Amino acid sequence: MPLGAIPEQIEFALQQLPPARHIKLYNSGSFFDIQAIPPDDYPAIAALLNPFERVIVESHPALIGDQCLRFRDLLSTQLEVAMGLETVHPEALEKLNKRVTLEQFAAAAKRLREQAIDLRVFVLVQPPFVCSDEALHWAQRSLDFAFDCNANAVTLIPTRAGNGAMDLLQQAGAFTPPDLQTFERSVEYGISRWRGRVFADLWEIERIATCMHCNTARIARLEHINLTQIIPPVVTCEHCKGAA
């Protein structure tokens, strides 16, 4: 990435967006990958972000090191780093080829905590190589692990097909998207622990909300949970009985 390109993109985006207290910079990779974000751009980026109360960036656990601390030191605001845990299912984690063990993830989380940097964690609900009967169990265990690592927020993502690799795994019988009930129960479990904020990723949620009679109300319920961190009454449906 050419020097100066990232600050220019951020400045342009800020001119188009309404005022906000928090800002997320997700670059489809790791913010602290020097091939993606030149460290020489850090001062200009930090200057643009300092008016915000919180800055959230994404990183692979292996890259939580000197570059992370250098960027933190340039900020006058709270830094939060989002890391993808995906799952604590041992076989699934290895087959997903995340190039990180649970021990390495926990060590990276510890480094963040020691430097007063907040942690956000991404967890997949029913990732490849986890059968539907065990999906809720492993989502719950992954939430527990994330909060054991002192995450202040966890985002639950219903694993989606559509990116080529997932489609091939689905055709091979190694992946099935979760149903909405499994996703709802995962979110409810996380909220009920009272260990940190839990958010439901609702992008293209219609893919798994298959009951035309209750999907609108159930999606609205998840939106309400995201905003309030309170579990409202379950939406009842005489057609799918909540199983769709």
Image (cartoon, rainbow, N blue to C red):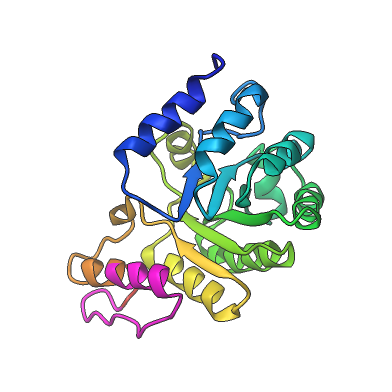
Left or right: 39 as drawn, with respect to 136:
right
Which residue is at 24% across, 72% downward? Answer: 217
Left or right: 11 as drawn, with respect to 235:
right
Left or right: 37 as drawn, with respect to 28:
right
Which residue is at 60% across, 69% downward? Answer: 140
On whether residue 50 falls in the magenta region, the answer is no
Q: Residue furthest bottom?
A: 233
Tell which of 119 and 13 is nearer to you: 13
Residue 151 percent location from the top left of the image: 66, 62
Tell which of 197 and 104 is nearer to you: 197
On whether residue 231 falls in the magenta region, the answer is yes
Residue 190 percent location from the top left of the image: 55, 72
Left or right: 235 as drawn, with respect to 10:
left
Task: Indicate whether 198 appears above or below 234.
Answer: above
Residue 72 percent location from the top left of the image: 69, 43
Which quadrant of the view contains residue 45?
A: top right
Task: Indicate whether 161 appears above or below 219.
Answer: above
Which residue is at 67% across, 68% downward? Answer: 144
Q: How many marks?
A: 0
Tell which of 15 and 33 is nearer to you: 15
Which quadrant of the view contains residue 243?
A: bottom left
**Magenta part of the protein: which range?**
220-241
Which residue is at 61% across, 34% downward? Answer: 30
Q: Residue furthest left?
A: 213
Residue 62 percent location from the top left of the image: 75, 38
